[in-house]
Image: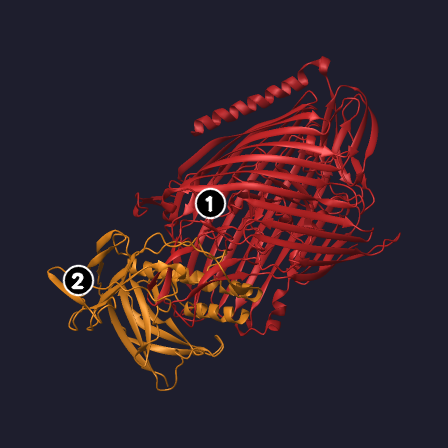
Amino acid sequence: MTSKNARNLFIFLILLISGLSVVGEGDPELRKNTISGHIKDAHSGEMLIGATVYVKEALTGTSSNLYGFYSLSLIPGSYTLTFSYIGFRPEVHTIKLDKDINLEIELTKTEEVLQEVIITGERQDKNVKSAEMSVVKMESKTIKQIPALFGETDVIRALQLLPGVQAVAEGSTGFSVRGGSPDQNLVLLDEATVYNAGHMLGFFSVFNNDAVKDVTLFKGDIPAAYGGRLASLLDVRMKEGNTKKLSGTGGIGLISSRLTLEGPLVNEKTSFIVSGRRTYADLFIPLFGNADLKGSKLYFYDFNFKVNHAINENNRVFISAYLGKDVFKNEFALMGLGNSTITARWNHLFSQKLFSNFTFLKSTYQYELGTPEGEANSFTWKSRLDDYAAKADFTFYLNPENTIRFGASSTYHTFDPGKAKGTGEETFFNEYILPKNYAIESGIYMSNEQKIGSLITLKYGLRFSMFQNVGPATVYHFDSNYETVDSTIYSKGNFYNSYAGIEPRVGITYQLTEYSSIKANYSHTIQYLQLAQNSTAGTPLDIWFPASPNVKPQLSDQGAIGYFRNFLNNKIEASVEGYYKYMQNSIDFKDHAQLLLNKKLEGELRFGESWSYGVEFMVRLTRGPITGWVSYTLSKAERKVKEINNGNPYPAPYDKPNDVSIVMNYDLSKRLTVGVNWVYSSGSPVTFPTGRAVWGNKVVPIYSDRNQYRMPDYHRLDFSMTLRGKEKPGKKFYGEWNLSVYNAYARKNAWAINFVQDSEDPYKTYAEKTYLFSIIPSISYNFHF
Amino acid sequence: MLRRLTSSRSYQVFHTTSTFNQLQIMKNSIIVMVLTITVMSCTERIDIKLDSQKYARLVVEGAITTDTTAQMIKLSKTADYFDNNPPEAVSGAAVYISSDAEEYQLTEMPEGSGTYFTGPGVYGKVGKTYETRIVLKDKIAGYDEYTATSSIYPINPLDSIGLDFKPDWGDEGFWEVKCYVLDPPTVDYYMFQVYRNNVLVSDSIDKVFVTDDALYNGNYTNGIGVAYLDQAREDQKLLPGDKVTLKVSRITKEYTEFVMEVQTEISFQSPLFSGPPANVKGNIDNGGFGFFAAYSSTYASVYVK
């Protein structure tokens, strides 16, 4: 599509919006009044995302948005409004609507423990009634109850227990959604893209659970407001900070300690939260008595900060920041890497029906490594990626039947893929610099959620996205054998290449009965950035690279259909979802690809198509002393690339046909909760040797077709026990002990399988598996005040 | 078990510590993180049932160099991966090395060994391209004739080498072999091998070091470390008076890639650092495995004080 078409589309959207406004406001007979406001937690002042408002007389309702805002337009009259949010006591307000009303709501938590649920729906029957499917929400406090590796509660590890979501390798927080690659997940922290969501080679995620308010994973039905990735959207929202009183949360664990402070500044209109976490695993290094680790440093830290200020009822500003860093150091190498993001947002109500949010953000991922300075062969190597983005998002609450969202965003990406140079005075290194490159990624969207009668909800939207490569740049041209023919140099500011596309998203929910529904959706998504990652789990050194004249954007078409049924007054939620996903311009890498410090990286890429399909079953217990879920996924994911595997389809690296998760929490008493989970999945596909050649006194493997074997099946049982302090009136400080056991029956799950030459008999070879975690017990102490 | 894994890994680490190939830099630098994993990991032998190879292939290992010794080409066959026997030699073949109008026929010595030698006076000349032609008695994988070609490029003679002891590395320290040579402005590829008292220490393909000159092209390599001798290993241990010889060979890009691919495929593979396993590409036609290399070499020695 050309930019002319883009302009036409934009004009079309503007007209559409203004047209709808006319419909809404035009006819005096249908004049409506609007009731709007925010829904908050009475205890902390935190905005509640997805709390519901139900209007008894009109048999309709709405839910609060990401900023806790709700708006409902109704014909003048008297109404009974019920505000509810799971885990909170519902509030009923009777209003006389004869003019526009602002109604701020504060909900109080029901009894802390017994009513708590593992995954909170916004509404008890949301599973069945909402227009969304393939979406999971998790709350920070519920994530906390799941048994954790080393006792480190981890958002992403909790998500990996859901159907269709899998860890890329044992212990990794990298995840694959419905067979997709990890770089096909858009990971957002307060709207800013997090390019590497892992610490310590991915064994921990960058999200400090204490600072996290809400986590939503869209496994396919990505809202039109977001784009740029094929497989999923992981939307992580940081807490805003307690507006009522100064409070804190913290914990001391085997690996790390955490402390979070939050509270009002000056008055209830301003609040802040600061949260820090640091690991101290390296303090234990001397205990291993391993000479190789002498003098080593190894730690990471995270720092989250957020402040928000309500200027008045119609304006509210937020500034949030994240800084995380990993440090590795020993006597002959050192390395530092991390993400940083800063987001500034402004919520503005143009009217009670038109909510808007403006975002400006910067996100950086960088790493630096090298050898100790001062020697002739000392060197450093740096790489970084910066995003500067602006977004405007509007929600127009036309009437209870139509909620229209529209907006635009633009991101300026700068890539500095690598720069290596000698640092010693007598260095014999030349500087080795990979040229920087620049790109602008933009999108405009519009979507509507429309209720038709009481049985059908439609969701439809269009996103138009555009990607432009901007000079200065050096573009290599490759022949059909991927050898460089020549190159073109583009000057600064030259928009030398662009791609654009329309991404439709459509969904329907048909309510069969009060307790059951059928949902279906289709989405088309485009991905313009990807990660040069050739191993399944990846390393922090893997670099992101953009679409370009040599690299077409990846495309995905996904369709899904599901049946949702609740039992026992919504106490049990059951669902079956089937999906099919077809992707084009999929990227894989040539054999023995060199992806780092390679000026001609694009020559290492091979393009093809891929597809995946599967069925996901899930049964959840949402209330009562026992909560949790059982899920089973049956799936397949394959790729086909002309130059790989002789052009025959082969299993994608994340193809795990069978996947089972059982997650249970049992509140034995107000003070004691026991958690258990069991996971099973088919082994990852691998390529094993079938033949051998002896060359250079070594046995060199000759391989089967790509991914024709599988690792042994993976399974694991974890336990946790949480013992809370006694509750007393007037008590200010609450502590709890958490005991967890990871891999309770000590299964030696294979992390890697290698074929090794026997040191005694060089012609003898054997298979050897490497496993990481045997049984790992851990204990941590958490507190809040 | 843990101990063993760590020490075998650190050999690889030190081997590549101050080397300049892109891949080596990466391996070197992520080693700190690898060490953390070694702390947590354990290994165990397992039984895996592998399919048999579909058909046997010819394996060719040979070179022509500027050294004035007899040149050798070794022929064998591939086998099932868990065959666990010495490879089956390919005997009775007619093996030739030729360049322009010159052609030498190699003689199998001893009979039945699959190793074929030229006479002692045959050596490669700088600037020439050599071809080997192998005519088998019986077909292997459908072919009875195989060829491969490779060229010899000029090399700057080594100025000198030095030794530097790194006491903190490994259990008993490492000797670093430092190399002083002017790298020409062309894009060059090198192979480094070490002798101790005239016995080759780099006696298998995993112990040679190959690299391009991308990061120091055209510079004087002022004591760049190119080989490491682990003092905890009997065959590498140096005593005062020992003679250490470095052999530097200028090899082709294709041979460099071949050696690196072989090294990748026989080294430790993990989900973090390794791409999918892939077959090594050599320069033997008709589906033969292996490489016929041609290169120029230069030597320098130093005595341990």
Coloring basis for residues: by chain
In the image as oriented, which residue stretches furthest toward the right? A729
Indicate the amino acid at tag 2. Answer: Tyr
The residue lying at 62 percent from left, 42 percent from top is: A632
Name the secondary structure under disc 1: strand
Chain with colour red in the figure: A
Residue A771 image position (x, y, % from top left)? 55, 61
Residue A331 image position (x, y, % from top left)? 51, 71
Tell me the quarter of the picture where residue B151 sits.
bottom left
Q: Is residue A79 left or right of residue A26?
A: right
Which residue carries the number 2 mark? B96
Indicate the amino acid at tag 1. Answer: Pro
Say which chain tag 1 marks: A
Q: For the residues tagged 2 and 1, is the chain the same? A: no
Q: Residues within 10 Å of mark 2 (few under 14, many from 20)?
A: many
Is residue A652 visible from the viewing direction of this image? yes
Chain with colour orange in the figure: B
Q: Are marks 2 and 1 in contact (CB under 8 Å)?
A: no
Q: Is residue A156 left or right of residue B271?
A: right
Looking at the image, which is closer to me, A29 or B194? B194
Residue B105 image position (x, y, % from top left)? 15, 65
Residue B234 image position (x, y, % from top left)? 41, 80
The residue lying at 51 percent from left, 71 percent from top is: B4
Looking at the rendered image, the quarter that the N terminus of chain A falls into is: top left
Q: Residues within 10 Å of mark 1 (few under 14, many from 20)?
A: many
Tell me the quarter of the picture where residue A297 sits.
bottom right
Which residue carries the number 1 mark? A651
- Give the vertical position of B109 relative to A263 (above or below): below
Looking at the image, which is closer to me, B227 or A435? B227
- Give the vertical position of B222 relative to A212 (above or below): below
- Give the vertical position of A747 relative to A670 (above or below): below
Say which chain tag 2 marks: B
